[in-house]
Amino acid sequence: MGFDCSKCPGYCCSHGRIAVSEHDIARLAGHFGVSVRTARRRFTYAYKTREADEQILRHRRDDVYKSVCRFLDPKTRRCTVYEARPNVCRKYPYGNRCGYYDFLKFEREFHDEPDFVPSA
Ligand code: SF4
Ligand code: SF4
């Protein structure tokens, strides 16, 4: 594997439009023991444009990136719903490499700081 998420503060979780399916919402509902309707309202919001009609994971403010998915733990930088995370999160970054991790590694080597995080 060409990347190590345990050394990254979760850049992919800062993506502004993490779309989830009805199946993803139902899985989150089961995880929290709430109705699908409650999960949809509590954890997602509707994003509608001429091109898109999606349910998006809600964000919260973040010190590392401007905002991140509400499920990312601000201290450990790990997903708090890992077992119930949406499919898109399971698949990301869709291969053996993560472009952001390559960038992070380059910047850390360049600055000679193993924990360096470039400002967003
Ligand atoms: S941005 Fe890449 S390295 Fe960082 S948590 Fe996401 S997949 Fe892992
Ligand atoms: S559900 Fe978990 S893995 Fe997916 S964006 Fe949110 S914190 Fe990241």
Image: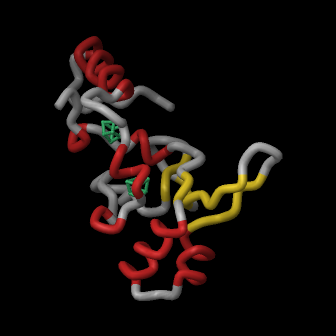
Residue plotted at (76% across, 43% down):
51
Q: Quadrant of residue 54?
A: bottom right
Q: Quadrant of residue 37?
A: bottom right
Residue plotted at (28% across, 12% down):
110
Of 37 and 7, nearer the camera is: 37
**Left or right for 63, reference 56:** left
Percent across and percent down for residue 46 are 69, 62
73 relative to 114, above or below: below
2 relative to 42, above or below: above
Of 74 and 59, nearer the camera is: 59
Of 18 and 4, nearer the camera is: 18
Ligand 2 sits in quadrant: bottom left
Q: Residue furthest top?
A: 110
Residue plotted at (20% across, 27% down):
2
Percent across and percent down for residue 107 are 32, 18
Q: Quadrant of the N terminus?
A: top left
Percent across and percent down for residue 106 are 29, 16
Asked if residue 55 can be seen in this view, the reply is yes
Q: Residue furthest left?
A: 1
**Left or right for 117, reference 63:** left
Of 94 and 57, nearer the camera is: 94
Asked if residue 60 can be seen in this view, the reply is no
Residue plotted at (32% across, 25% down):
104
**Numbered marks: total:** 0
Percent across and percent down for residue 117 are 36, 31
Q: Quadrant of residue 11?
A: top left
